[in-house]
Image: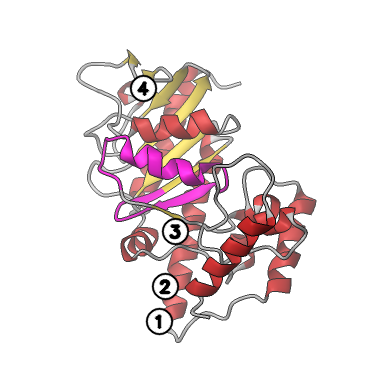
Amino acid sequence: MQNEYEIKKEICDIGKRIYNRNMVAANDGNISVKLNDNEFLCTPTGVSKGFMTPEYICKVDAQGNVIQANGNFRPSSEIKMHMRVYQERPDVRSVVHAHPVYATSFAIAGIPLTQPIMPEAVIALGCVPIAKYGRPSTMEIPDAVSEYVQYFDAVLLENHGALTYSDSLLSAYLKMESVEFYAQLLYQSRMLGGPKEFTPQQVEDLYEIRRQFGMKGRHPANLCPNVKEGKPSCHTCGGGCASKEKTPVSADMVAEITKKVLEQLGK
């Protein structure tokens, strides 16, 4: 089991990877790791993620209050967003926020990453919806993200960036890589005349592969309302299958979701 210093070193290593892959500029982005229910390590505000060393890393409690910070280092102003994810997803041990160029471009354009074009993206990510815009460092962003946290492991932030989270720091970071790669492929295939999407049956086949792998996390293959009703999965729902209700999904809700999907498809 890693000690705190080793985790801090890993945070710095992931910070360098994010910076070197042009997923952040200047002092952008933030990373956090859950130690226990009331202790979290996080990157400081006002510091480039490419130049951190372990002593830069701060420790906060579940409310984002400082437990330990060296010198003038203070937790990221976006720690509220991280805390909301931990509150609503007990399985999550790490959160990564960055501004990858292609994924953020889709977030700025208001286009969710929902087109099924690549086996790895369909199996590992599913849909990547867009949380509505919120002012930085306010509760608006956590509130916007909250709508999707229970249903997806990656979310675009409108006019802002991307957020990924998982049961380990490495996994959360790799999801960010996958989101950006998916966005880049989708963008470039659109420049070539438009991607050829998988058929509904091909998507369902990929979902079944995910189920057989027993992959962790939240994904339309497991949580989509249509699946719960024994119907085909709605990979291109654009995030419409997110619902804060924890009760069984009704036929009326499925009908409303179907209506919204058809509207988005222009049918």
User: Which amino acid does the dot numbered 4 rest on?
Assistant: Gly
Which segment did they paint magenta?
134-162
Q: Are discs 1 and 3 less than 8 Å apart at CB?
A: no
| Residue 65, numbered circle | none
Residue farthest to the front? 252
Residue 214: percent from left, percent from top: 75, 46
User: Which amino acid does the dot numbered 1 rest on?
Assistant: Met
Give the residue pinned by disc 4.
64
- Mark 1 vs 3, N-terminal side: 3
User: Which amino acid does the dot numbered 2 rest on?
Assistant: Tyr
- Mark 3 vs 2, N-terminal side: 3
Residue 210: percent from left, percent from top: 72, 55
Q: Are discs 3 and 4 less than 8 Å apart at CB?
A: no
Residue 157: percent from left, percent from top: 37, 51
Find the distance from the CA under tag 1 to the CA under tag 2: 7 Å
Give the residue pinned by disc 3.
180
Q: Are discs 1 and 2 less than 8 Å apart at CB?
A: yes
Find the distance from the CA under tag 3 to the CA under tag 2: 10 Å
Give the residue pinned by disc 2.
187
Please identify the quarter of the rendering in which residue 225 is found: bottom right
- Horizontal side, residue 147 vs residue 21: left or right: right
